[in-house]
Image (tube, rainbow, N blue to C red):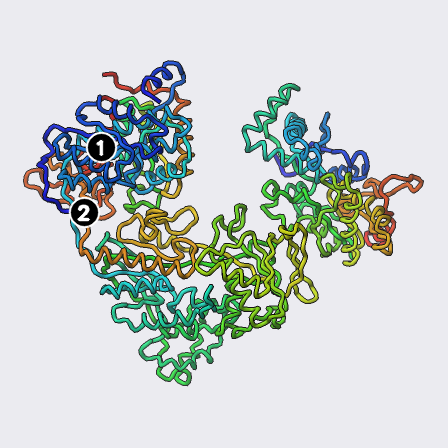
Amino acid sequence: MSEESKRKYGFFLGCVTPNRYPMIEASIRAVFDHVGVEIMELEGASCCPAPGVFRAFHIPTWLVIAARNITIAEEMGVDIITGCNGCYGTLRDAWVELEHEHELKKMVNEHLAKVGREFKGSIEPKHVVQVLYKDLGIEFLRGFVKHKFNDLKVAVHYGCHIVKPSDKRPWGGECEDPTFLDEIVEITGAKSIDYQDKFQCCGAGGAVRTAVKEISADFSREKLENMRNAGADIIIDCCPFCHLQMDLGQMEANTIYKDMVGEPYKIPVIYITQLLGLAFGIDPSLLGLMKNHDLKGVSPFIPLEPFLEKVKEQLT
Amino acid sequence: MTEQAIEEKKSESKEWEPKIIAFLCNWCSYAGADLAGVSRIQYPPNIRIVRVPCSGRINAYFIIKSLTDGWDGVLISGCHPGDCHYISGNLVARRRFAIIKELLEFFGIEPGRVNFMWASAAEGERFAVLVRKATEIVKKLGPNKKFEKKW
Amino acid sequence: MTETDKKIEITGNEKPKIGVYVCHCGVNIGGVVSVPDLVENAKTLPDVTVGREYKFFCSDVGQKMIKEDIEAGLVNRVVVAACSPRMHEPTFRIACQEAGLNQFLFEMANIREHSTWVHMKEPEGAYEVAKDHIRLAIAKARNLAPLAVQKVSVEPVSLVIGAGITGMNAAIDLTKAGYKVYLVDRSATIGGHMAQLDKTFPTMDCSSCILTPKMSEISRNKDIELLTYSEVTEVTGYVGNFEVTIKKKPHYIDQVKCNGCGICVDACPITVANEFDLGLSTRKAIYVPFPQAIPSQYTIDMDSCVECGICARETVCEPLAINYDDEPEYIQVKVGTIIVATGYDEYDPTELKQYGYGKYPNVITGLQMERLLSSFGPVVGKPVKPSDLEAPHSIAFLQCVGSRNFREGGNKYCSRVCCMYATKQARQYKEKHPEADIYIFYMDIRAFGKGYEEFYESAARDYGINYVRGRIAEVRENPLNHNIIIRSEDTLLQQPIEVEVELFVLSTGIEPRADSDSITNLLRIQKSADGFFLEAHPKLRPVDTLTEGIFIAGVSQGPKDIPDSVAQAKGAAASAIGLMAKGEVEIEPFFAVIHPDRCSGCGMCIQNCAYGAIEYVDDRRFGEIASVNVALCKGCGACSGNCRSSAIDIIGFSSEQLNSMITKRE
């Protein structure tokens, strides 16, 4: 098979993307279509289930449901690609654990047999960023760049589950100091800036956002403060939950911590494939960047206009 | 357990257990087996240990005699290549075993009955792991009926 | 071994009368299998005349039971079924000898380490294994023959590899007992790591003050041949008779002509990092390791030297002592005993990225801090921050860096000295800077030695050093002033804690030498799982190795402080002296023998022998056949494994004995 021949992946949507931030899905599909990768649907996929809440309540249930999702892709013979750190965390942790623990695998397959499924471990769950960085590669992606930014300061937010636990991730044990997402950002000509506590959690996961909103808002407030102090024009992330926390959460931080914040934050929050797509020359409306402002109470909450101005200036 | 109780239990259980003779070199593998004992690392009771000064002491005749005398498997363990107490005894053994392995297959002895391994004096855990592996392999092959000499 | 008047005439041809003694070993054996049943079963086997059981056969009472049977003529072969022969074979052999029975008519069956201890949950299986091991031992016992021990002389000379505090102490003790010592060190000076220390805990003795007199003693001692800047390249032979080749590395300076003026150092244009100061200062390519080095010799580090020729000019080196064509010199010596005291390496924390070592300038290691505190170090004992060379107002220490780590990055063991050296360094700094804030972040404080607990208590109570029980979670640098911001949890207060300090010291642990394989390959000694040299028995023989005549001591055997290192040095020296004082050592007479009538003269055995112990001889009856030189033969059997004619056999592990163990027929 030649290099050009189409790579295929089964697209695991998760929950936050289709329900709250469908533009993330749009941009992922647009970018992969553009570079010649085939995205297939995983019929019957459910919630991953969430690595924080679900796993904390009952690990065997979490394992079985995760394994079931993996078997959908196994039956199609394709690797899973997901754009969410949380789904990635669950699917990948479950995949690695079941590979090594035979007792667990037996237990899981006993349950899956009841619905006529069997976990074999024959496909690998991958993150969108993993596919971009490892399967396709920086050089390959560079070949698609049509326009480059010349003055865009990006605060890159990795999130947590994409790098940890490091022994179950493909980054060679590197979780203290990763650079792969910064490298992808810089293909577009934007500059990834350093800011204090860059690898701090956004505060959404682990039921923190659900259970203790103020504490979770304090997390994002601290991050936003550090990003603002470093002079960030936009925030780039690779997880819809982080995206939600930094976007809707930015409004919440502005409200809940009004006195501490002072001037309200208004840093546009962009998903990585949205940025990449722009550099590839894909129409911004296909990347979910154009919001109809008659729509209220719908994402994105922080206006993207300042960013779109820069796009118009720098990319044409 | 008393002798009688064992006989009763034996006649009850139908599961056959392989009997493997293990030639361990005094300096590394025998010490490694001792360490497994001292550390109370458990492994299945299928091997019977014969101490030899060096893995190089073992020649093909001992291996074949073991099989014709009815042992289900043979295990030979020495020092890691490069660490032999007698400098190169295990290297001589390794070359010999490479040929013996082919010879045994030629005879029709199932691969897996005769196993060669290396375990050092500090590797109690490794010794136990390798014994478990070898026992499993021999168990899958079944009792050694082919070559047992009937007297 | 003991000489005895009693002697039972055994030729080896009489009918064997085997006594089988099955030990309970407390509950170790008796608690898992039925010892009485094992005894009864053994008594049913042919040639077994006596079968007994006892709680502890290795005890005096147990041994007496065996001796009585021998003296009464009831047995002429003894089988003890108990622990590993590596444990008590010598014990029982002596017992037999004392009762008048040749010690080689004894065999042991291992039913503890190889049965009851590894099949604890399967007592039936353990019983079967024990039964068979006893049967195998009885089978071998039938074919044992009386043998005479071989005595070899022991050269009254010792080789000590490594001239740190351990090696030096061992060497001095050896000479006090009247033995000559070759003291070899690969560095250009003796003193080892202790020379890098400033003060030693808990007495706060100045390290140089207690070390330098020892170093002088070494240099003055006529019985010590000091070979610094040298390496042992080959060791052959056996206990009492080791042939050692030592390579004396070239200094590229004629030490006789050199008058030590030092002008060459000033003139040398090449500057490199000074490894003695761990990179905190520089030295030239031509150098003396440190001012008090012994021997006080100059050396050219040829890896850094560019041979510009400046130092060789007459205007620089008046005595014309520089010699770029210097060659290594090889000497061969014969020694009776060898002591390995090669010391340790410091753990390199660069891989622990979360602590910023190598990234932030104000993060240093424990040994680097030691050099900063040292009065002849780069800052003559007044520690400063690397970023701006100012004295820090606050310091944080992190314990267990590279130690007690079960994940990637570091070692599992505890390095034993770090709790104490961090306390010591903190106290030292506080003495000069009472207003400084010092934090020690720890998991546990291990202050186990004599005076250690009091030292630590005083550090916390009197000196006001803050001990925070918590692993540091995150380390960041304040970009404005290179201060280190530390986030941790104070687990005793159950609160997060954030401190900004000016200097961050990682209390790095101890590691085995990176090239310790060169020693293990050279001497055929083993390493334990943690990488340090393996002792013969962790409790009872901590300085012996499994190879007779070779001893280990100091940190090369495992992390320890100076008092314990010196204690081991003395222990190793005493063991070596014991061997050399006797003047001779007994060797098991397990050699290869050739049946001349069967030998076809093919020469395969000659090729296989690593010791060159076999050669061709012209036998007047059988023509050209192989012959074994017993003086060189080690009894490994590599020769016999290939013999097609069954012409070569090993006494003690003969074909007859092994075959009798293999056969399932009784």
Q: Position of residue C270 (x, y in %)?
A: 49, 73
Q: Where's the N terminus of chain A, which quadrant?
A: top right
Label drawn at residue B15: none
In-front residue for pair A73/C507: C507
Q: How far apart are the alpha carbons under marks 1 and 2?
A: 20 Å
Instruction: Identify the amino acid type marked 2.
Output: Met
Residue C82 in the image: above or below residue C606: above
Looking at the image, which residue is at 73% across and 49% down? A157
Tell me the crowding category of disc 2: few under 14, some 14 to 19, or many 20 or more residues within 10 angstroms, Cα based. Answer: some
Query: Which badge, 1 or 2, is on the more N-terminal residue?
Result: 2
In-front residue for pair B47/A132: B47
Residue C165 figure quarter: bottom left
Residue B63 figure quarter: top left
Seen as rendered, the residue at the extreme right is A294
Same chain assignment for discs 1 and 2:
yes
Residue B117 in the image: above or below residue C231: above
Q: Secondary structure at mark 1?
A: strand
Q: Position of residue C551 (x, y in %)?
A: 31, 54
In-front residue for pair C14/A23: C14
Q: Position of residue A76 (x, y in %)?
A: 66, 26
Image-based side of C136 in relation to C249, left or right: left
Q: Position of residue C390 (x, y in %)?
A: 62, 72
Q: Disc 1: which chain?
A: C
In-front residue for pair C211/C600: C211
Looking at the image, which residue is at 39% across and 66% down? C187
Disc 2: which residue: C1
Residue A313 figure quarter: bottom right
Instruction: Identify the amino acid type marked 1.
Output: Val
Disc 1: which residue: C79
Q: Disc 2: which chain?
A: C
Asked whether the viewer can see residue C149, the reply is yes
Tell me the crowding category of disc 1: few under 14, some 14 to 19, or many 20 or more residues within 10 angstroms, Cα based. Answer: many
